[in-house]
């Protein structure tokens, strides 16, 4: 499972980077979204993946028995996903505005403010 | 959109959905639910209403500007953190009051509920601001 | 004490919420913005007084003890940064009264500034790495909207570069957080520091240190990660770019200082050499970039980059004197750089252009404004007895004590080039007559914040002793993280 996740994260990072380096704005945004998904999955995997051990305390016990799925990273990525969602929404609206004002989707055309 | 069926059903659905969203918000402390999901449900209800009738009607229904609703929610959430500080504890420390009803049921009223209600309003406000603005732009 | 720690976060949040409630009335929002920023500065000063007396202030939100809860902690550096944030916030709020157009005000300029200030103060006060990420996102979201608000073509082009690079930085930061959590099972900075010291995985620690350095390096705009900054800062309204110039890159520098003094202490050896090289290149490349520019705000943007290099020096040398120099430089730089951007706005208002070739005649028409430009400009270049001279003097002395001759030579050469840039602005915008023969218009209200910040520059320059002592004490705290760790992990209230 870990190997599979590692491969998946690697593929997500690679394709995210590839998309960010493309010239089209739409692909840039997709690339950024992929990068944040990769980071989220990385956090998820870091917490040692395990099945059927939810972090719930039985009625009869007072503390959590030792092997259990760590809930903290899940809370962390929940936050990160919400933030990522907001940022992606903003970025989508922004490229829409950029397209409206500049009339192009090509990042290489947007060089008038470079020095 | 101009559909008689949609309009008629939306009239019923709106109140049901808003009621359901309040239910979701209230059960959030110990069970799945909470201000965020409740707020999203209410936003969905209002958006449906905007589709069936028009955006101006929804804006009138909200009375306040959507972003002012969000501002109100922020103020409430912020205020909910203060009672804890009166006792010298840290910000956001929860405080509970036991409300005993005549028939014997006890209701735990606490600052987390106020916080959740604040979140509920923020989500409605921001959600409506985004969706209504986009709907207006498309309508132009 | 709890209230003191949360107030710098709550005050701007409350102000923003009230601004939203008054969404329809721009006038109310304007005054709310000024009043809220003044209240933020007051609460920051109260916090600073408390921390100055006791050394540390710690609060755990909701009484959930560290390392489980949300920790807010202020040491001297954090409290000082919050005060500086308050000063910049207030000055920009006053300045924006006379400079922001009503279109931007109606679409939320004032609440956004407050949310930005909240994010900045949160980042300075948090004691938890994940919360640092969240505060970064809060201030970034606000800054994204402020960058794009208005929607002019140049602005949108600048915005897309700014947003992209900062999002990449956030993704790297998040990945680093994930790896760090996997390694230590904690994200509370004090706790992570203790746990890392007990572990022995040098390769992973090096990887993490470099990831954090890249993530914060993009935000702080160090070489070779700074290209977004000069491509975007000159496209926004002056009040916004002054706010960004004063605070945003400095949040990155603050995060670097915090992480490399508290979390990764002595474990990572090569990072110091890396920082030295980066500091030299940042100083040199930034200042050389400025030489080629003829637009006032572009020149100033490149100088931000070059000044960040000076701040990295202290962090790289990591001696008490060098760190004190970095803290001093941070304080001096925030005030001076914000002021220079405010001046650039006044110059453009008076002469009609940011382009040096198209402006001129200001010295003859408004000698007062010319003097107000000279104070921060000479301070930036490091002319005694202004604040910049002392900052550079301390860093150069620390460099010589550590035997880093190359570093010292670069730092001194860069300050000469800074002087050339400032004199270029002086001779073009102030000294030479206006190319079209116009008489520069008066700038009215804009002079107020500029004069106030120039007075602060003079105060730091002439009253260098107390400021230096403060910097030395905060450097002392940074070099002895045990105090911080104990305060966070043992604080009950």
Image: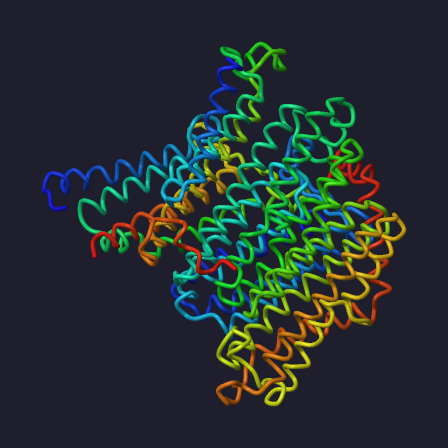
Q: Is residue B128 above or below residue A77?
A: below
Q: What x and y, as percent, mark residue C76? A: 77, 51
Side of C438 where B21 appears, left or right: left
Q: Is residue B107 above or below residue B39?
A: above
Side of B9 where B38 appears, left or right: right
Side of C179 where B138 appears, left or right: left
Most distant residue in the right direction = C401
On the question of residue A102 being in view, the answer is yes
Residue at screen point 50% across, 42% down: B115
* Quadrant (top left, top right, bottom left, bottom right) of the C terminus of chain B: bottom left
Most distant residue in the left direction = B4
Side of C453 where C229 appears, left or right: left
Q: Nearer the viewer, residue B77 or C471?
A: C471
Q: What x and y, as percent, mark residue B92? A: 59, 41
Residue at screen point 58% across, 45% down: C135
Q: Is residue B68 above or below residue B1?
A: below
């Amino acid at each position: 499972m870990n190997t599979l996740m590692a491969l998946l994260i690697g593929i997500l990072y690679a394709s995210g980077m590839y998309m960010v380096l493309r010239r089209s704005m739409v692909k840039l945004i997709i690339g950024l979204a992929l990068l944040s998904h990769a980071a989220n999955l990385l956090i998820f995997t870091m917490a040692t993946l395990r099945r059927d051990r939810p972090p719930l305390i039985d009625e009869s016990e007072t503390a959590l028995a030792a092997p259990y799925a760590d809930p903290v990273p899940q809370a962390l990525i929940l936050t990160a996903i919400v933030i990522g969602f907001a940022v992606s929404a903003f970025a989508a609206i922004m490229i829409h505005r950029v397209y409206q004002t500049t009339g192009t989707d090509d990042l290489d055309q947007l060089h008038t403010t470079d020095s | 959109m101009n559909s008689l069926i949609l309009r008629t059903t939306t009239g019923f659905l709106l109140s049901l959905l808003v009621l359901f969203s309040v239910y979701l918000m209230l059960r959030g402390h110990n069970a799945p639910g909470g201000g965020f999901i409740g707020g999203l449900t209410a936003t969905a209800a209002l958006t449906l209403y905007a589709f069936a009738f028009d955006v101006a009607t929804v804006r009138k229904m909200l009375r306040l500007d959507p972003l002012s609703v969000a501002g109100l929610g922020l103020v409430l959430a912020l205020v909910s953190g203060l009672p804890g500080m009166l006792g010298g504890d840290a910000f956001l420390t929860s405080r509970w009051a036991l409300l005993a009803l005549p028939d014997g049921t006890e209701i735990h009223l606490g600052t987390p509920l106020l916080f959740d209600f604040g979140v509920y309003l923020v989500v409605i406000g921001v959600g409506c601001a985004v969706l209504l603005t986009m709907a207006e732009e498309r309508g132009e | 004490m709890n209230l003191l720690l949360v107030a710098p976060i709550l005050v701007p949040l409350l102000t923003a919420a009230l601004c939203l409630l008054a969404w329809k009335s721009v006038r109310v929002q304007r005054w709310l913005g000024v009043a809220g920023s003044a209240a933020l500065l007051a609460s920051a000063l109260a916090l600073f007084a408390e921390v100055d007396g006791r050394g540390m202030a710690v609060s755990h939100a909701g009484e959930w003890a560290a390392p489980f809860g949300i920790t807010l902690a202020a040491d001297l550096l954090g409290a000082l940064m919050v005060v500086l944030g308050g000063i910049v916030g207030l000055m920009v709020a006053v300045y924006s009264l006379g400079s922001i157009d009503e279109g931007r005000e109606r679409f939320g300029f004032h609440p956004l500034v407050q949310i930005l200030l909240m994010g900045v103060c949160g980042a300075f006060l948090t004691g938890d790495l994940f919360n640092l990420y969240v505060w970064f996102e809060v201030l970034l979201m606000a800054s994204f909207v402020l960058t794009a608000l208005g929607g002019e073509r140049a602005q949108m082009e600048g915005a897309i570069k700014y947003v992209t690079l900062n999002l990449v930085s956030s993704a790297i930061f998040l990945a680093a957080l994930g790896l760090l959590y996997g390694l230590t099972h904690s994200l509370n900075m004090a706790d992570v520091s203790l746990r890392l010291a007990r572990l022995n995985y040098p390769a992973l620690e090096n990887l993490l240190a470099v990831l954090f350095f890249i993530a914060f390096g993009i935000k702080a705009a160090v070489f070779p990660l700074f290209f977004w900054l000069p491509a975007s800062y000159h496209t926004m309204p002056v009040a916004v770019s002054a706010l960004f110039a004063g605070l945003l890159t400095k949040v990155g520098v603050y995060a670097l200082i915090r992480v490399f003094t508290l979390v990764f202490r002595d474990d990572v050896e090569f990072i110091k050499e890396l920082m030295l090289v980066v500091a030299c290149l940042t100083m040199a490349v930034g200042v050389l970039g400025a030489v080629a520019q003829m637009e006032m705000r572009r020149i100033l943007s490149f100088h931000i980059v070059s000044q960040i290099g000076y701040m990295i020096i202290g962090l790289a040398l990591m001696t008490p004197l060098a760190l004190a120099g970095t803290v001093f430089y941070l304080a001096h730089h925030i005030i001076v750089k914000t002021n220079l951007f405010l001046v650039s706005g006044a110059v453009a208002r008076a002469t009609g252009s940011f382009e040096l070739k198209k402006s001129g005649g200001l010295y003859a028409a408004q000698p007062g404004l010319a003097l107000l430009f000279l104070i921060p400009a000479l301070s930036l270049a490091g002319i005694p007895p202004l604040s910049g001279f002392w900052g550079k003097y301390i860093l150069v002395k620390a460099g010589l004590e550590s035997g880093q001759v190359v570093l010292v030579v670069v730092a001194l050469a860069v300050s000469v080039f800074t002087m050339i840039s400032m004199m270029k602005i002086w001779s073009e915008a102030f000294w030479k007559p206006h190319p079209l023969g116009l008489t520069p218009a008066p700038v009215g209200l804009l002079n107020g914040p500029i004069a106030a910040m120039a007075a602060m520059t003079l105060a730091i320059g002439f009253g260098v002793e107390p400021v230096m002592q403060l910097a030395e004490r905060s450097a002392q705290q940074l070099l002895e993280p045990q105090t911080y760790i104990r305060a966070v992990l043992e604080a009950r209230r």
